[in-house]
């Protein structure tokens, strides 16, 4: 069994940013699962969605996760996509190969981060919010719907934490039983 540290949560919850910091803190490698999918496909995520739809992307995502989970070698810190734990048997794969941390950032903070970075324009599932009559409201509604749909999956993480400073998150991880 691997001992990867998997970060799950909604878009803009800090999975990649905090993941890199935790990897450095623990002296581990870091992997962004979306980046691996892009590298293997030779296409961007919007291009994958355009050519294969969400179903094709989710199949690629499950295959990439299974490959990472079964890969021998040093444990990694892995930033998953926001929907990763919600499809196929991905949640079971996450639990079987590591420790799962839900970055449960308040929706108002997610909205601020997404709006500030104009992320809606580059994320296929958020694209419709960018062209809505009231983009900020459409984005807020998307976040609320998506959190409601995914929270049952996210709640199965070993630890639920709002994110923050690396030392604080690392202390919470270790108190919850994560062994670096």
Image (spheres, grey):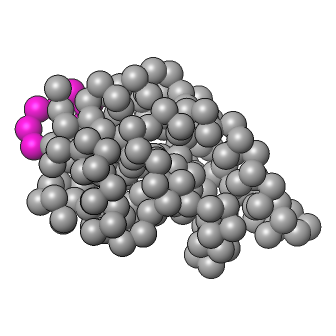
Q: Residue furthest bottom?
A: 116
Please indicate whether residue 52 sits to the left or right of residue 40 in the image: right
Q: Which residues are magenta?
A: 67-74
Which residue is found at the position 27% from the left and 69% from the top?
A: 167
Front position in the image: 167 or 5:
167
Residue 103 screen position, x and y as percent: 47, 54
Which residue is found at the position 27% from the left and 59% from the top?
A: 170
Please indicate whether residue 73 sits to the left or right of residue 31 in the image: left
Please indicate whether residue 72 sits to the left or right of residue 152 in the image: left
Front position in the image: 147 or 60:
147
Which residue is found at the position 24% from the left and 44% from the top?
A: 178
Kindly tell me whether residue 65 is visible in this rendering. yes
The total number of labels drawn is 0
Kindly tell me whether residue 39 is visible in this rendering. no
Residue 35 screen position, x and y as percent: 37, 52
Q: Residue furthest left?
A: 73
Front position in the image: 132 or 70:
70
* Magenta stretch: includes residue 70: yes
* Magenta stretch: includes residue 125: no
């Amino acid at each position: 069994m691997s001992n990867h540290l998997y970060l799950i949560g909604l878009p803009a919850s800090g999975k990649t940013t905090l993941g890199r910091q935790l990897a450095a803190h623990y002296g581990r490698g870091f992997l962004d699962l979306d980046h691996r999918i892009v590298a293997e496909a030779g296409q961007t995520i919007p291009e994958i969605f355009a050519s294969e739809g969400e179903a094709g992307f989710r199949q690629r995502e499950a295959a990439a996760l299974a490959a990472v989970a079964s890969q021998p070698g040093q444990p990694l810190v892995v930033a998953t996509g926001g929907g990763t734990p919600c499809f196929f048997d991905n949640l079971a794969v996450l639990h079987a190969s590591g420790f799962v941390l839900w970055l449960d950032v308040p929706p108002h903070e997610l909205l601020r981060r997404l709006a500030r970075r104009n992320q809606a324009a580059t994320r296929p599932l958020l694209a419709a919010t960018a062209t809505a009559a009231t983009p900020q409201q459409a984005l807020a509604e998307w976040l609320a719907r998506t959190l409601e749909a995914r929270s049952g999956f996210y709640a199965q993480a070993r630890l639920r934490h709002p994110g923050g400073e690396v030392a604080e998150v690392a202390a919470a991880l270790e108190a919850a039983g994560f062994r670096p």
